[in-house]
Amino acid sequence: MTDAALRPTEFRLLTSADELAVLPEFEQRVWGGDSEMVSVNVLVATISEGGVAIAAFDGETVIGAVYGFPTRDAHVLHSHYMAVDPAYRRRGLAVELKHRQRAWCLEQGYTHMRWTYDPLQLANGHLNLHVLGAVGVRYHRNHYGSLGGINGSLPSDRVTVLWDLHAAEPRPVPELSVEVPPFAHDAITTSSGEAHEARLAVRAGLEDHLGNGWLLVDINRDARQYLLAREPSL
């Protein structure tokens, strides 16, 4: 067994420019390209205004991170990204990072987090909806424009999810499902025809529902189905 396998993961709250300087390189390593990288000066500015960056380290190597900043809603933090090095996935690190971010939010008086994710990335959908219990509230067509890297040239459609950090009530019962057509593992990165078809199919199923009386409440990853429920009446 290697020394790295024996080392415990260390979690650090990053605040200064020197501490945050490791994150752009980490983003590039995980996502490729330059368009998704957040510069150090932006990290410093947003964190000094009430944001947060938490990184997981194996020794002195960043292996995962979450970063978020305040929104127009005083009780809501926007979680701009959560990333885990591919070599360290399937170890529960993503869940641990999100719960550490949640704990920080609660200490600072935030009651909700929201973020966006690509609905074609079913593993992310499973984490967001099924594991954490967030709900999808809005669909955005080509939200970030052209991204490149692991996103290829697909339109950057995204779903906004909202995570109630105090939620104890069960979510509403699903009444509608939306199929996600199958595609090859690298289809998004290579922007294949089947990935484009899947993008359009999911867009057709979700775009007109989210924000119009429906919530995305769960996912059946094996069946490749998103599950929607009617938004509860106030």
Image (spheres, rainbow, N blue to C red):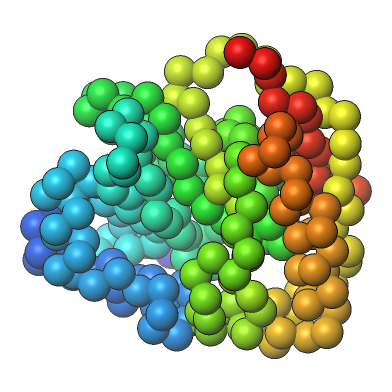
Instruction: Residue at 33%, 35% (x, y): give it.
Output: 73
- Seen in the image, is 136 located left or right of residue 19? right
Residue sitting nearer the eye, 33 or 61 = 33
The x and y percentages for residue 219 are: 77, 41
- Seen in the image, is 168 located left or right of residue 154? left
Instruction: Residue at 72%, 62% (x, y): give it.
Output: 120
- Asked which quadrant contains residue 211, the reply is top right
Say how many tags the image has: 0
Q: Is residue 1 above or below residue 234?
A: below
Residue sitting nearer the eye, 115 or 212 = 212
Q: Is residue 190 above or below residue 172?
A: below
Q: Quadrant of the C terminus?
A: top right
Regarding residue 129, the answer to whether it shows in the image is no
- Seen in the image, is 225 located left or right of residue 23? right
The x and y percentages for residue 61 are: 30, 66
Regarding residue 195, the answer to whether it shows in the image is yes
The x and y percentages for residue 126 are: 68, 45
The x and y percentages for residue 106 are: 31, 24
- Seen in the image, is 168 located left or right of residue 30? right
Instruction: Residue at 80%, 45% (x, y): give it.
Output: 226
Q: Is residue 113 above or below residue 81?
A: above
Instruction: Residue at 44%, 25% (x, y): give it.
Output: 165
